[in-house]
Amino acid sequence: TDHKVSAAHFDKLARTTPEQAARKIYKDLASRKGRCLIGVDAQVIDKIQRGMPVSYWNVIERLMPSN
């Protein structure tokens, strides 16, 4: 199914361990940041979305591997 394929792609991209994510979340909460992005992939996607809000999904579609 599409959900299983998407989950498999996510598992390949997500390189942040739960421990690393927890440290980042704790640090960002302690510094009262308004946004907490976990991993380089999240930071890249955030920059794409902010830079191209109208065509964001077109860019993301091109970046995702096809079946």
Image (spheres, helix red, strand yellow):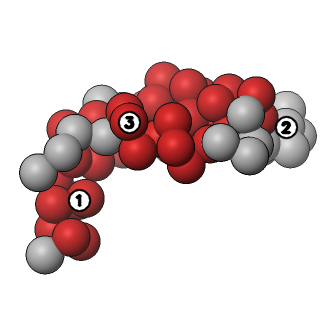
Q: Amino acid at mark 1?
A: Ala
Q: Amino acid at mark 2?
A: Lys
State the separation of the CA atoms marked 1 and 3.
17 Å
The crowd level at tag 3 (other Cα within 10 Å; few <14, some 14-19, many 20+) is few
**Sequence-first tag of 2 and 3:** 2
Query: Any mark on residue 33, and which?
Result: 2
Query: Any mark on residue 27, and which?
Result: none
Q: Amino acid at mark 3?
A: Arg
Residue annotated with mark 1: 7
User: Seen in the image, is 18 located left or right of residue 47?
Assistant: left
Residue 53 x, y percent position in the rendering: 75, 43
Residue annotated with mark 3: 62
Q: Is residue 8 visible?
A: yes
The mark lying in front, picked from 1 and 3, is 3
Instruction: Answer with the quarter of the image where residue 44 lies.
Output: top right
User: Seen in the image, is 1 located left or right of residue 55?
Assistant: left
**Sequence-first tag of 1 and 2:** 1
The crowd level at tag 2 (other Cα within 10 Å; few <14, some 14-19, many 20+) is few
Compared with 18, 1 (above or below) is: below
The mark lying in front, picked from 2 and 3, is 3
State the separation of the CA atoms marked 1 and 2.
28 Å
Verify CB contact (< 8 Å) between mark 2 and mark 3.
Answer: no
**Sequence-first tag of 1 and 3:** 1
Give the residue displayed 21% in from the left and 70% down from the top.
2
